Amino acid sequence: MEQYIKDFVSVVIPAYNCTRYIAMAIDSALGQQVPLEVIVVDDCSTDDLPGLMTRYRGEPRVRYVRNEKNQGVAQTRNRGVSLARGEYVAFLDADDYWAEEKLRLQLDRIRQKQAVICSTARELMTPEGRLTGYVLPVKEDLTYRDMLQQNYIGCSSVLIRTAVAREFPMHHDDAHEDYLMWLEVFEKYRYGCAINEPLLKYRLSTTGKSGNKLHSARLTYRTYRYHGMGRLKTLVCFCSYACRGVKKYARYLWKRGAL
């Protein structure tokens, strides 16, 4: 049985051409109120990410590794998980950041609920990094059935037991690889918890998988199929996802005055 450092968190940051904002992500992780390490996995960036990372040479909590060839985000996160020493893994994308109490509150909640995975609500920010004040809430008690209807979990909000993250590695970059992982975790463990506070600051993107909503919808359909669901069940779940997604982002656009 693998041994992990108890009550210790390994923060995994996949990185690719992100020198504009990764320092904010790393610094927000280092500012957490729990014992941790930060593992930055560089997926063969072509910008000066190695140069930027030299500023953390004197910080023993930061580990920087570089893939020998471009692997994609799923395998890059998996490599970070494989290097984790903590009892828990927290995922953080390079363009997002956390409120300073995020991991402390999650550790308290995940122990209290005896869950294997815990997420949080998220506040949206513009691609330029300006907070919008618009919060995507999350149910504080999540079931497998909930997760089939909608992906309530933002990847950068997740705290998960390391053993479980290794049991269900991410795969299929041609779908929503994180959502696929959550479905697999919930299918076995049936339950997860969350904190309905915007402890994650989530950057909207026009180029990522979720930036183009039609493209994101295609990836969601593919995610259900990769999860082994038949066409009829996939269609039912997809319709639920689509309706909830339209309502969620319609509220955001209305608040922004775009509707």
Image (spheres, rainbow, N blue to C red):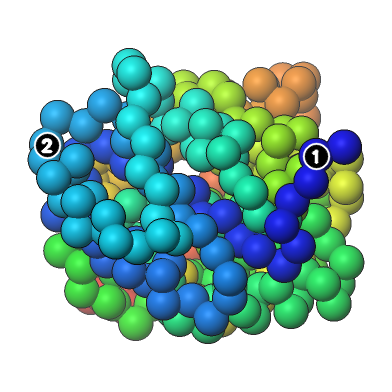
- Nearer the observer, 204 or 165: 165
Q: Residue 117 shows which numbered tag?
A: none
Q: Does residue 111 appear anywhere in the picture?
A: yes
Which amino acid type corresponds to the residue marked 2 in the rendered image?
Asp
Q: Quadrant of residue 127?
A: bottom left
Give the x, y percent position of residue 6: 76, 62
Query: 226 or 182: nearer the eye?
Result: 182
Q: Secondary structure at mark 1?
A: loop
Instruction: Identify the residue shown where x is 41% and y is 60%.
Output: 60
* Relative side of 259 to 120, left or right: left
Q: Is residue 22 left or right of residue 231?
A: left
Where does residue 202 sit, x and y in percent of width and height? 38, 63
**Which residue is at a point 58% across and 75% down the rendered structure image?**
34
Q: Which residue is mark 1?
A: 2
Q: Which disc is residue 47 wearing?
A: 2
Is residue 230 found left or right of 208 in the rendered image? right
Q: How dense is the environment of label 1, judged by Cα within 10 Å: few (below 14), some, or many (20 and up)?
A: few
Q: State which quadrant residue 153 falls in.
A: bottom right
In percent of the image, x 14 and y 29: which residue is there?
46
Is residue 204 visible to us here? Answer: no
Which image quadrant: the C terminus?
A: bottom left
Q: Residues within 10 Å of mark 2 (few under 14, many from 20)?
A: few
**Image quarter of residue 166:** top right
* Nearer to me, 101 or 67: 67
| Sequence-first disc among 2 and 1 | 1
Above or below, 194 against 48 in this view is below
Q: Residue furthest top?
A: 69
Q: Pinpoint residue 61: horizontal percent, then vertical percent.
A: 44, 60
